[in-house]
Image (cartoon, rainbow, N blue to C red):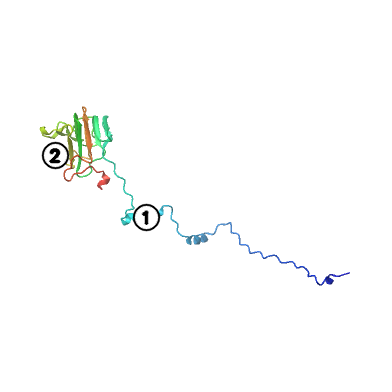
Amino acid sequence: MRTPSSACPHVTPSVTAPPPATPPSRPRPSLRADPPHVRRRRASTLPALRPPGAASVFCCLRCCRDGGTGHIPLKEMPAVQLDTQHMGTDVVIVKNGRRICGTGGCLASAPLHQNKSYFEFKIQSTGIWGIGVATQKVNLNQIPLGRDVHSLVMRNDGALYHNNEEKNRLPANSLPQEGDVVGITYDHVELNVYLNGKNMHCPASGIRGTVYPVVYVDDSAILDCQFSEFYHTPPPGFEKILFEQQIF
């Protein structure tokens, strides 16, 4: 009987290889939030982030400050025209707020804030009419205007009326006719009349407060207003009506 030690000397006994080394496992991240001081320290190392659009806003502000051309222009002011919110019941306004017909009066859409204003009306069809200035308290259904303190107008017969008083009158041979252009200047003291660019030297005054250009028609009269791009050059120092934002 053989013992284990007497095994065949030419056979090498098998040796079991050790298992491969397992790399050390990384610690699993904690499910708990980091302490506040850790979060603050981590945040301080991150690059600063700008909200969306911040770069463009910064650029715009820099352009405006430095006088560059990158600023956005202000919106253009609307054109002055006849105001359908301040007109008589039987008035008709057409041609984009430039023509009046029917019966009654109408104010313009902008007051005369500036020191010296100029505007024109062209007589397209004769009849009963009047042009001048008035406050918003005027009764636009009661024509002819000029019968109270709220309006100062030149009537179609050439007479200038305020508070039911004739203040002046055009020469009899210079009454406006169909096709004529009547210009009005106002400097917060006097109203003057120009006929086809010629000064009629008929000043009138007396009205107080904030006034607007005013026009009234009746008996088939038709008038067109001209608040810019005038037929005739305004007198020196006078200009088209400006909105209050344009003055300042």
Location of residue 207 in the rendering, given as x and y in whole percent from the top left corner: 18, 38
The crowd level at tag 2 (other Cα within 10 Å; few <14, some 14-19, many 20+) is few
Q: Is residue 27 left or right of residue 101?
A: right
Location of residue 202 in the rendering, given as x and y in whole percent from the top left corner: 12, 37
The amino acid type of the residue labelled 1 equals: Cys
Q: Hey, which quadrant is residue 117 in on the image?
A: top left
Location of residue 123 in the rendering, given as x and y in whole percent from the top left corner: 19, 33
Camera-side residue of 180 and 81: 180
Camera-side residue of 14 and 36: 14
Q: CA distance from mark 1 to mark 2?
A: 53 Å
Location of residue 74 in the rendering, given as x and y in whole percent from the top left corner: 31, 47
Determine which residue is flagged by label 1: 59
Determine which residue is flagged by label 2: 198
> Would you place residue 36 above or below residue 147 in this image?
below
Q: Kindly check if marks 1 and 2 are in contact, taking CB atoms under 8 A apart as contact.
A: no
> Would you place residue 241 above or below residue 14 in this image?
above
For image coordinates 35% across by 54% down, the residue present is: 61
